[in-house]
Image: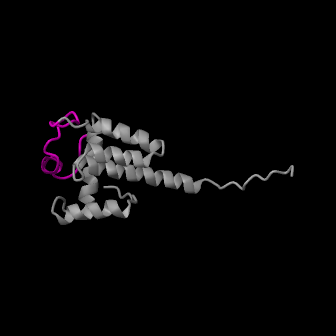
Amino acid sequence: MVKSTVRFSEDVVSEVESLVADGHFESKSEFYRFASDYVLEQLVDSYEPVSIDYEEIKREIAPSATPTGGSVDGDVPFFESVVVLRKYALRGNFSDAEDFIDHQYEPNHPHAIVLEDMLELYRSRAADVESSQPTQAPVHDRHR
């Protein structure tokens, strides 16, 4: 395995730690590996999840998920949710993206958790881009 460092907000880490404490996952690493495999499986047709016990965890965590990325109870298909979230995030409309997640999913729904993690990555990337841009000195009116 390759080690990669990713920063998450305290809220995201707290939620993941709660899931670990509740026994849904054995560790935070298992959660992050599962979440990554889950999203990739939804988005990339040829992707095969590599997490240990992936199918078992998926059955426990997301029993209503269907192979098409939708769900049996008529929710918005996960892939469509990812597209909507991406559009909001790329436009800097993070609060709209949060509202979308809140209105489409229950707080503990696996799709909501993955979408919130994705939103945090977009928010973090936007902050990194903003902080790396040089600030320009204000232009003063020279004709005064």
Residue 30 falls inside the magenta stretch = no
Task: Tell me, yes or no, if residue 50 can be seen here.
Answer: no
In this picture, is 19 found above or below 57? below
| Residue 78 makes an appearance in the image | yes
Position of the N terminus, as image quadrant, is bottom left
Residue numbers of the magenta segment: 48-73
Residue at the spot x=22%, y=37% of the render? 75
Q: Residue at x 27, y 39 (%)?
A: 78
How far from the left and from the top, in percent, is residue 54? 18, 49
Q: Is residue 130 above or below residue 91?
A: below
Image coords of residue 109 (percent x, y): 22, 49
Front-lying residue, 2 or 63? 63
Quadrant of the image occupied by residue 11: bottom left
Name of the residue lying farthest toward the bottom = 21
Residue positioned 36% across, 64% down in the render:
10
Compared across the picture, whether 78 is left or right of 94 comes to left
Chief secondary structure of the magenta span? loop
Residue closest to the eye, 144 or 42:
144
Report x, y in % for residue 56.
Answer: 12, 49
Quadrant in which residue 97 is drawn: top left
